[in-house]
């Protein structure tokens, strides 16, 4: 790593942002830091979605499944274990579930993978719902409330971990392999990459962070049922955030999550009945006019931009 | 000594035999051409060899080992490299990155990134693309994209290189350069098995030629024999 002036500025800025973000709960109202927790949550989902789906171009519409599984882990375990263990278990369950899902679905290409992941999320929701009604008779569950300041910091830590993981993967040879898989999976396979193992593993890593985020936020939402935990709107929102911010850019998902969470909050409070429609309009506008997202506008010259979002469905 | 052999290789897609009971062999150090009209089963045969899909029946052996049921990455790791028709370079990645991928995941499993980059540079120079290394593949001409594919395949350190219609779409000057490149590849000790439609090229560089038609092998021999073979001529003129 060369120490140029530019790099030093970058690290300096990063450090300042970290410090600012670390002390928010002490200098702002509860509304701000609770809202920030939601922003961090979406950022975790978006960043981790991008880890796998951004490079490989397998568009997953099943983020709610892994997020929801994390929430449910916290809901089921409740007070039985200390919070850190509950959170870790939420991530672990999501990881294992993603391994199983990956083994069966990652043979599907393009649009079929997208539909299957969406269907899986719905399937999981209905299965859990059936189970809760018929087996445990607990259709809704109450999760013990966690101190919002603790929730803030745990979510922030997970976000930083997700960003760090994203960076490490992108700069590694496996991140490179994921990118090649996105360009031409068959050619990549023929160059000696065990594409099945690579896809399943990074899909699982991506899903783990979603599970962690779910387990953490359960302690704030407190009231949990299958419709809330496995809400498909979250699956689409996450994809939209990555698109707006810039797919395959490291900070793209973060920017997209920040923008859309803030917009949603503003819209919710000002235009309560129209915000979903406005969201839809934003989605269409992004696909038509900003296929590489906001950060994609600043992509390096000479590196060509891919042919729009539809090029991602192979 | 055959480096590659196939016995009774057959592939059905539904009711259609794309490849039907084909026996073949490629000896170490040879350049073998595979020709035939469109739809003869040439690329299918390549796909069977590299494991893209499994044959319906028959066996394929590489360096004496049965590779019939192996997956493409395993076959690549054993020393078979290939190019594709149509070209499958990594479009938005630079020529350098295309070749680097092959180098990082090719047969030297634990190669360091620095060594891989060095190897990549060497191969780019070998095919003549060092000036264009930073250009994304999709911005290169088709001829250069094919060179990227060749360099990328060579980066995996193959002992046998399968070239699928490397000369398609090339002008005569480029064809001559491609033939020269194949000779240089062979001089590195790599056996070459190539599918080709450009007759002068195949006849000019192959030691031996195999002809497929409707999935069956209809002729095999040295170029002079094949050029005079009546069945082969009819098959081509009749198309």
Image (cartoon, grey):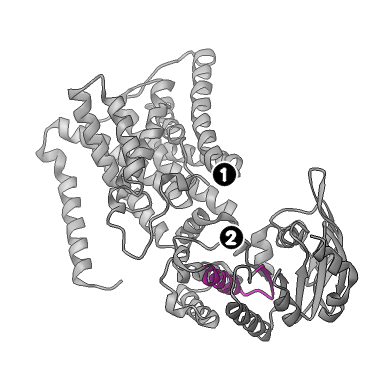
Q: Kindly identify which residue carries mark 1.
A: A109
Q: Residue furthest right?
A: B230
Q: Dividing the picture into quarters, in which one does residue A220 lie?
A: top left
Mark 2 vs mark 1: which is more N-terminal? 1
| Nearer-the-camera pick, A132 or A11 | A11
| Residue depicted at x 23% and y 67% | A7
Magenta highlight on residue A161: no
- Left or right of residue A23: residue A275: right
Tell me whether marks 2 and 1 sit on the same chain: yes
Q: Residue furthest front?
A: B237
| Residue depicted at x 38% and y 28% | A233
Pointer 1 indicates a residue of which chain?
A
Instruction: Tell me where residue A164 appears, x and y as whole percent.
Output: 34, 54
| Nearer-the-camera pick, B213 or B78 | B213
Distance from disc 2 to disc 1, alpha carbons, whole Å, reads 15 Å
| Nearer-the-camera pick, A284 or A251 | A284
| Nearer-the-camera pick, B223 or B42 | B223
Magenta highlight on residue B162: yes
Q: Dividing the picture into quarters, in which one does residue B219 lie?
A: bottom right
Q: Is residue A149 visible from the viewing direction of this image? A: no
Instruction: Tell me where residue A30 appears, x and y as whole percent.
Output: 15, 31
Q: Kindly identify which residue carries mark 2.
A: A187
Decide: is A285 above or below A7: above
Q: Is residue A135 visible from the viewing direction of this image? A: yes
Decide: is B97 above or below A234: below
Element at label 1: loop
- Left or right of residue B161: residue A154: left
- In the rendered image, the quadrant that contains the C terminus of chain B is bottom right
Instruction: Tell me where residue A298 appears, x and y as whole percent.
Output: 27, 56
Identify the magenta region.
Answer: B142-165
Q: Residues within 10 Å of mark 1 (few under 14, many from 20)?
A: some
Pointer 2 indicates a residue of which chain?
A
């Amino acid at each position: 790593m060369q120490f140029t002036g530019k790099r030093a500025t970058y690290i300096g800025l990063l450090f300042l942002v970290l410090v600012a973000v670390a002390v928010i709960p002490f200098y702002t109202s509860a509304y701000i830091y609770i809202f920030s927790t939601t922003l961090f949550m979406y950022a975790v989902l978006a960043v981790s979605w991008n880890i796998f789906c951004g490079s490989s171009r397998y568009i997953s519409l099943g983020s709610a499944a892994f997020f929801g599984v994390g929430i449910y882990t916290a809901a089921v375990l409740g007070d039985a274990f200390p919070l850190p263990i509950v959170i870790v278990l939420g991530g672990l369950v999501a990881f294992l579930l993603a391994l199983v899902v990956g083994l069966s679905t990652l043979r599907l290409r393009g649009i079929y993978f997208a539909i299957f992941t969406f269907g899986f999320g719905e399937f999981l929701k209905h299965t859990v719902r059936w189970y809760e009604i018929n087996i445990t008779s607990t259709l809704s569950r109450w999760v013990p409330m966690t101190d919002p300041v603790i929730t803030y910091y745990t979510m922030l830590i997970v976000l930083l971990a997700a960003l760090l993981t994203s960076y490490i993967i992108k700069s590694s040879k496996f991140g490179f392999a994921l990118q090649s898989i996105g360009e031409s999976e068959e050619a990549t396979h023929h160059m000696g990459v065990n594409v099945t193992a690579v896809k399943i593993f990074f899909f699982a890593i991506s899903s783990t962070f979603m599970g962690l985020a779910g387990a953490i936020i359960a302690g704030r939402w407190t009231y949990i049922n299958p419709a809330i935990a496995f809400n498909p709107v979250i699956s689409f929102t996450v994809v939209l955030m990555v698109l707006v911010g810039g797919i395959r850019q490291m900070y793209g998902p973060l920017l997209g999550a920040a923008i859309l969470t803030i917009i949603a909050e503003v819209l919710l409070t000002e235009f309560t009945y129209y915000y979903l429609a406005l969201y839809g309009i934003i989605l269409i506008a992004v696909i038509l006019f900003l296929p590489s997202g906001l950060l994609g506008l600043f992509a390096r010259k000479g590196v060509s931009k891919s042919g729009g979002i539809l090029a991602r469905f192979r | 000594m055959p480096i590659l052999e196939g016995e009774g290789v057959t592939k059905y897609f539904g009711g259609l035999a794309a490849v039907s009971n084909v026996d073949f062999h490629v000896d170490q150090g040879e350049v073998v051409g595979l020709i035939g009209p469109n739809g003869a089963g040439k690329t299918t045969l390549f796909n069977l060899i590299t494991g893209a899909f499994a044959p319906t029946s028959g066996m394929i052996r590489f360096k004496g080992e049965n590779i019939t049921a192996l997956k493409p990455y395993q076959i690549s790791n054993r020393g078979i490299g290939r190019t594709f028709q149509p070209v499958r370079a990594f479009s938005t990645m630079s020529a350098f990155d295309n070749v680097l991928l092959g180098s990082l995941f090719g047969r030297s499993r634990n190669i360091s990134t620095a060594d891989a980059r060095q190897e990549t540079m060497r191969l780019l120079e070998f095919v003549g693309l060092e000036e264009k290394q930073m250009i994304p593949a999709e911005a290169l001409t088709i001829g250069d994209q094919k060179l990227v594919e060749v360099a990328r395949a060579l980066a995996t350190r193959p002992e046998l290189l399968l070239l699928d219609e490397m000369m398609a779409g090339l002008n005569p000057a480029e064809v001559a350069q491609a033939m020269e490149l194949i000779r240089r590849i062979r001089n590195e000790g790599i056996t070459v098995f190539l599918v080709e439609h450009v007759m002068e090229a195949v006849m000019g560089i192959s030691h031996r030629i195999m002809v497929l038609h409707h999935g069956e092998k209809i002729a095999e021999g040295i170029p002079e024999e094949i050029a005079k073979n009546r069945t082969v001529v009819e098959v081509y003129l009749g198309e």
